[in-house]
């Protein structure tokens, strides 16, 4: 089952934390929570680890790091579609995604996927080599951050394995992502840091980094990919 959920490449990458029982331990904690709370994604859902299946390890060239799955529902189903920041399962984009799309559209006169902007689905990014992962892969309904502690070691292993690849570009938005970016020590990587695209943060600076709004971070990301002889992302 794990091989199916993670995809063959990521299954092999995650073998150490599978073999030592970490994922089994996480599953027990998540299932225990399911007895008391509504947990996203639902038990047995193929949304679990979808980001890894959409973007195999060998294809990753850019990483966008979110916190945890969207915690809300629309028409009785979770709006989380398996990819960080993506709203492919919803007719209404999240406030963060609204600001992400505005930033792209304000900074690009070409290289913009209009079909994607009308659907709020970021699968096309994933298929171009953008790994859209959260630092937690489950969450209680309407309770952001509720499962972060369960996934901490799993996420550390993922980031360490990505750090072993050369020439990756990272878009790190907000304090949570920037802190995780401290695990990225490979000198061939580029880290582009801004504030978070959420309505409360997108116009504010964070630490010594610019506000998300007006940062041109998507243009900068493509420039960094070009400098590494990688094809740009059609946002």
Image: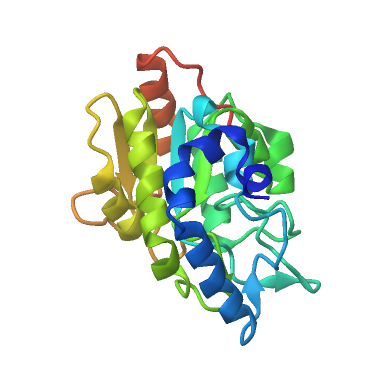
Q: Residue furthest left?
A: 208
Q: Residue furthest right?
A: 75
- When the figure is inspected, residue 146 is found, relative to residue 194, above or below; the finding is below
State how the image is colored: rainbow
> Which image quadrant: the C terminus?
top right
Q: Is residue 102 left or right of residue 164?
A: right
**Which residue: 71% across, 51% down?**
88
Q: Position of residue 216 (x, y in %)?
A: 40, 37
- When the figure is inspected, residue 139 is found, relative to residue 5, above or below; the finding is below
**Which residue: 58% across, 24% down?**
110
Q: Is residue 11 left or right of residue 192?
A: right
Q: Position of residue 157 (x, y in %)?
A: 37, 47
Q: Taking the image as drawn, is residue 58 in sight?
A: yes
Q: Is residue 43 left or right of residue 137?
A: right
Report the front residue among 230 and 200.
230
**Which residue: 22% across, 27% down?**
187
Q: Taking the image as drawn, is residue 141 in sight?
A: no
Q: Residue furthest bottom?
A: 36
Report the front residue among 232 and 106.
232
- When the figure is inspected, residue 128 is found, relative to residue 105, above or below; the finding is above
Q: Position of residue 83 (x, y in %)?
A: 60, 49
Report the front residue among 86 and 33.
33
Q: Position of residue 64 (x, y in %)?
A: 45, 43
Residue 192 position by quadrant: top left
């Amino acid at each position: 089952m794990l091989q199916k959920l993670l995809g063959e490449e990521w299954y092999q990458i995650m073998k150490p934390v599978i073999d030592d029982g970490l994922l089994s331990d996480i599953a027990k904690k998540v299932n225990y929570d399911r007895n008391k709370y509504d947990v996203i994604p639902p038990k047995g859902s193929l949304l679990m680890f979808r980001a890894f299946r959409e973007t195999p390890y060998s294809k990753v060239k850019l990483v966008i790091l979110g916190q945890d799955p969207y915690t809300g529902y629309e028409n009785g189903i979770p709006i989380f579609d398996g990819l960080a920041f993506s709203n492919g399962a919803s007719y209404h984009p999240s406030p963060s995604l609204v600001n992400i799309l505005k930033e792209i559209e304000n900074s690009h006169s070409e290289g913009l996927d209009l079909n994607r902007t009308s659907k709020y689905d970021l699968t096309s990014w994933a298929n171009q080599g953008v790994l859209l992962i959260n630092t937690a892969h489950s969450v209680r309904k309407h309770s952001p951050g509720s499962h972060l502690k369960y996934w901490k070691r799993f996420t550390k292993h993922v980031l360490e394995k990505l750090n072993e690849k050369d020439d990756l570009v990272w878009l790190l938005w907000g304090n949570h992502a920037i802190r995780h970016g401290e695990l990225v020590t490979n000198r061939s990587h580029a880290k582009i840091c801004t504030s978070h695209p959420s309505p409360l943060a997108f116009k504010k600076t964070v630490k010594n980094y610019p506000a998300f709004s007006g940062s041109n971070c998507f243009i900068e990301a493509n420039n960094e990919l070009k400098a590494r002889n990688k094809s740009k992302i059609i946002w």
